[in-house]
Image: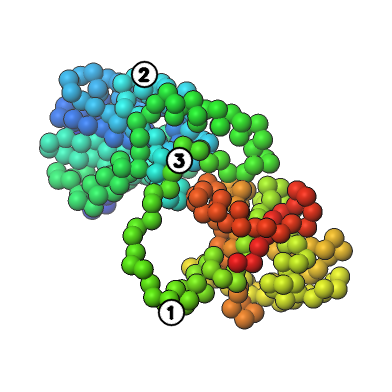
Amino acid sequence: MGSPLPTLTCGSWTLTHLTDSLKKSLSSDTAGTEFHLFAYAVTTSGWNEVRREAKAWMARKSRRKAVAYIGTDHALTDPDALRQMESDGVSVRLMVEYTGTYHPKVFWLQSSRLHSLWVGSNNLTRDGLLQNIEFAALIQSPTENPAFRKWFDEVHRGSEPLSAAHLRSYETERRAFARKRAATGAFTWSGRREPPPAATPTPSPRASAVASHSHLGGAGDLVIEVMPRETGLDGKQIQLPKDAATTFFGLGNAIGAQQNITLTPAGSTAQRSLTMTLFPNNTTRLSIHDLDYRDRPCVIVFRRSGREFQFEIVSRSIFPNRYRDLLRRCIHQTRSGARRWAIL
């Protein structure tokens, strides 16, 4: 295999200019049998940067195969790029069953003599490959790493071959999302599924009672819808209806009433002290620094412990089933079309 064009070599790690390294390795490879691509997002211009070398690599030997595992999160993937890759002989698979965001940027060239693994921050887009400030490393080994194989198997199980129905569904929803991006927030393809939860032993009644108060979403927690358009920089500020603020946070009923609270993200120790104020429009505001427009639509789950509160952002794009379930349970509204909330 030819030189991977490193910019720095240190121990077993080689930092690379990913695009040149990948193209030169594909062009000079004589023993490779499989080429796998794992991409959070792909665009036509991005695929075109490596397309010629990938096609030539497949054509030089029979039975070579290229397989791409592509994500749809946040509607960044271009449907035309998926068509082009498939037309070029790549087996395209869409991620459909997983939790979290499918976010890898990995290229794996596999042979009987050497495994080459490019791992970086580069999306398979023109910006990711040529324009942005990115970071990538090349790892080479004569043997396959068992931990990586386990990761690969999990990704494979969460994907399905690209079909005409998948493509039609994704393209239709992506086009609609583009027309109202500012109002709808993060994109979630309806073809995506959450895997079933792992089976757990049935707890005793006492254990169930304790557990109901020990996780977000249990009894006594405030669940509130975050509307698509909120005030505040980067969409980080949310408004709470008066009844939710007074009932859950203990804020007074009089206009101008104030309440000091301590707010902590779930699973974090980064506490913030905030002062809540009831405004003349019967709402109060909270700034959630962890919240981003990309999280929307979402609900926020608050859990109380004295004057301290934890919160969790449940985004439709990451936890679609849980998001829909929590939103269905939000039965209170201050008026038609206003945000929904409930104390569970």
Q: Nearer the viewer, residue 108 or 254?
A: 254
Going 32% across and 25% down the picture, which residue do you hit? 90
Q: Is residue 281 left or right of residue 58?
A: right
Q: Nearer the viewer, residue 15 or 191?
A: 191
Mark sitting earlier along the chain (3/2)? 2
Q: Disc 1 marks which residue? A: 206
Q: Nearer the viewer, residue 67 or 204?
A: 204
Do labels 2 and 1 touch, CB within 8 Å?
no
Q: Disc 2 marks which residue? A: 87
Report helix, strand or loop for mark 2: helix
Local crowd size for mark 3, using a 10 Å CA cut-off: few (<14), some (14–19), many (≥20): many
Q: Amino acid at mark 2?
A: Ser
Q: Quadrant of residue 335?
A: bottom right
Q: In the image, residue 243 lies at what x, y percent?
A: 76, 67
User: How far apart, in angstroms, are the residues tagged by discs 3 and 2?
Assistant: 24 Å
Q: Name the quarter where the N terminus is drawn.
A: top left
Mark in front: 2 vs 1: 1
Local crowd size for mark 1, using a 10 Å CA cut-off: few (<14), some (14–19), many (≥20): few
Q: Nearer the viewer, residue 339 or 276?
A: 339
Q: Amino acid at mark 1?
A: Arg
Residue 77 sits above or below residue 52 on the image: below
Report helix, strand or loop for mark 3: loop
Q: Is residue 56 left or right of residue 45?
A: left
Q: Which mark is residue 192?
A: 3
Mark sitting earlier along the chain (3/1)? 3
Q: Is residue 275 visible?
A: no
Q: Which mark is residue 18?
A: none
Q: In the image, residue 159 lies at what x, y percent?
A: 35, 38
Q: In the image, residue 251 lies at what x, y percent?
A: 76, 74
Q: Quadrant of residue 217?
A: bottom right
